[in-house]
Amino acid sequence: MELLKKKIEQEGIVLSNTVLKVDSFLNHQIDPELMLEIGKEFSQRFANKGITKILTIESSGIAPAVMTGLQLNVPVIFARKRKSMTLINDLLTSTVRSFTKNETNEISVSQKYITENDQVLIIDDFLANGQAAIGLIDIVQQAKATIAGIGIVIEKAFQEGGQHLRDKGFHVESLARIASLEEGKVLFVSEKTSEVMK
């Protein structure tokens, strides 16, 4: 997605060979117009999947997931990282290790929001080692629902998460695939040639 790649080039900050900071438009301050275009792109890529629900994880996945849900006209559910007084019974839970935050969270979704009849699209902001996606997959599978696909805003293709999910047979669509963050530069993977492009 060229619009997203340009935004990453203009505003993304490479903090290390493995960490890209995009908090000016994705995971702290949010660019609503970009999120709308991301929602449109995901809705086109998964248009024929019969999606009935979208599942994400708080908090950075919520904006792209909501915009995708708006386009597909389906509800959006986000897995919560913290328990609340109103989210205590009949929960689907899984454990997720965050690469960037270096912490482990138990995520939860109420059983009443995902049923065995649902076709679920998983959406998240980043894909690195794939731990968040695996946790969300686990929740969908506990509900005996079907995983229609996995939509990722930014994939770090130099880490194993994306390949691992594809090897398991999941339909993964990443809007920007990063081949390298070395020397402080963002290099993208070309979807057509699978070669690195600047």
Image (spheres, grey):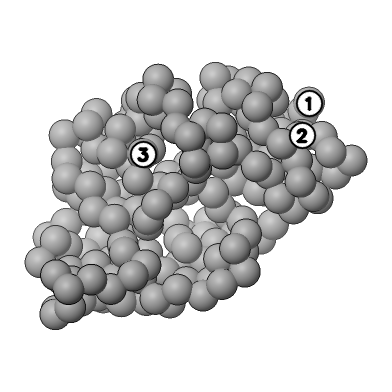
Q: Kindly state the secondary structure of the residue where label 3 is placed.
A: helix
Q: Give the vertical position of 111 relative to 5 (above or below).
A: below
Give the CA separation, mark 1 to mark 3: 27 Å
The answer to which of marks 2 and 1 sits earlier in the sequence is 2
The answer to which of marks 1 and 3 sits earlier in the sequence is 3
Horizontal side of residue 10 vs 91, given as left or right: right
Q: Kindly state the secondary structure of the residue where label 2 is placed.
A: strand
Task: In this rendered view, identify the residue nearer to me: 23 or 114.
Answer: 23
Give the CA separation, mark 2 to mark 1: 5 Å
**Is residue 128 visible in the rendered structure shown here?**
yes
Horizontal side of residue 198 vs 171, given as left or right: right
Q: Which residue is mark 3?
A: 63
Tell me if label 3 and label 2 are in contact, CB under 8 Å: no
Horizontal side of residue 118 vs 59, given as left or right: left
Q: Position of residue 73 (x, y in %)?
A: 16, 34
Q: What residue type is disc 1 on?
A: Lys
- At label 1, counting other C-alpha atoms closer than 10 Å, the crowd grade (few under 14, some 14-19, many 20 or more) is few
Residue at the location (44% across, 47% down)? Answer: 60
Residue at the location (81% across, 50% down)? Answer: 17
Tell me if label 2 and label 1 are in contact, CB under 8 Å: yes
Q: Give the vertical position of 190 relative to 74 (above or below).
A: above
Residue 187's tag is 2
Residue 1's tag is none
Q: Position of residue 193 (x, y in %)?
A: 70, 30
Q: What residue occupies the far right of the structure in this picture?
A: 183
Q: Position of residue 145 (x, y in %)?
A: 21, 64
Q: Which residue is mark 1?
A: 198
Pair 3/2: label in front: 3
